[in-house]
Amino acid sequence: MECKKLFETIDKLNDEYIRFWIDVCNIESPTDCKENVDRCGEYFIEKARKRGWRIDVHEEDVSGNVVCITLNSDSTASPIVFSSHLDTVHPIGLFGNPPTRCDDEKIYGPGVTDCKGGAVAAFLAMVALEECGFNARPVKLILQSDEENGSRSSKKNTVSYMCEQSKDAVAFLNGEGYIPGFATLIRKGIHKYDFEITGEAVHSSICYSGASAIAEAAYKILELEKLKDPDGLTCNCGLINGGTAENTVPAKCSFTADIRFSTTEEMKQAEKLVSELAEKSFIEGTQCTVRLASYRVAMEKRDENFALLDKMNGIYEKNGLPVLSPKSGTGGADSADLSHFGVPSIDSLGVEGGNIHSVNEYAYLRSLAESAKRMAAVAYCI
């Protein structure tokens, strides 16, 4: 199908949705601030309600609520699903007042690329589809609320809701940040383990009589930090806490290990390593317990995802958009859960930017319309 009118409509609406983008990013919404995550969701709900679209809200007590907005909700055809998350990582106030600013080329602020830009681009795509008379299938936009902590605060309830809303979808297109010329089809899974080590406290003057929990933790951390395969298992031990005084052998120490894996087999290797390491004592008199604090499944290589990208590239080629090569990502994303659930999934279709998770996060203003065209064209033609 010819997308010329669709793209012209997106270009016509672009300035309005740049302002939308600024408004949403000015609502600072770290994952642990349910009130503000919900305010972001309400901003989208208000805009969708004015257009008469269907609105479903999955309510959570701790996390923000997940919002699902549907265009063409009366259609019985299989839907296409767009998704992005509204939660961000930084405490409120770090970006100044207002937190979002623009120059001639870029927008700067919390979540402009990760991942509110993708959410706004998806909404723009839906508006353009409607204005061009598209009614062939439902188009859903799922706005996730606790992606940044791996949906730990909702105990994965938010992800379960996303899977339920997407169960019969022809495609799940996720609006994480775009890397020019690429789409993400493979992502590592993530297991975060909390290690708790106990030892025996004595005065430093007779340290040889005690059992240092910190020293035991150090041995274990050094073993874990050997995992550094870019294409396989990696580990980063980024948090540690222990000891009570500088002249006391520490009786307690805790640390967190972030282990990433590419396949289910690698996940099992990591589980075995962690279990064996917890049981082993390098220092006599120490004990260790370990628990899985949070997890993300891997987005493994799946034929249906590559077949979907082939269809998308055929659409892009016919309509003058850049074709996309498949790539692997090392960070987690909701697309991994949807792919694992069996829904054909493509990631990294959002806006183009950089410095994500920093106070210098930015996105290119031109990339909003580019992202909207990538998503709208697939919905229009698939």
Image (spheres, rainbow, N blue to C red):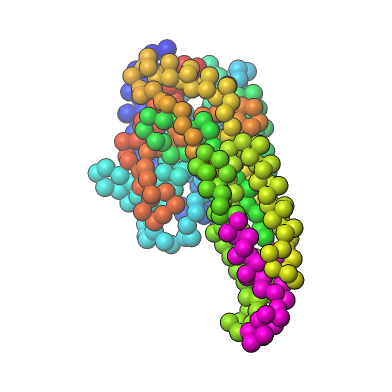
Which image quarter: residue 324?
top left
Left or right, 282 with reference to 189: right
Is residue 221 covered in magenta?
A: yes
Residue drawn 42% across the image and 12% down it: 1
Q: Position of residue 31 (x, y in %)?
A: 55, 53
In terms of secondary structure, what is the magenta stretch mainly? helix
Whether 3 is drawn above or below 374: the answer is above
Disc tally is 0
Is residue 279 covered in magenta?
A: no
Residue drawn 49% across the image and 34% down it: 328
Q: Position of residue 16 (x, y in %)?
A: 35, 37
Query: Can residue 114 be seen from the camera position used here?
Result: yes
Magenta span: 196-223
Whether 370 is drawn above or below 315: the answer is below
* 138 or 181: nearer the viewer: 181
Query: Can residue 142 be seen from the camera position used here?
Result: no
Whether 98 is drawn above or below 173: the answer is below
Whether 243 is drawn above or below 373: the answer is below
Residue drawn 43% across the image and 62% down it: 93
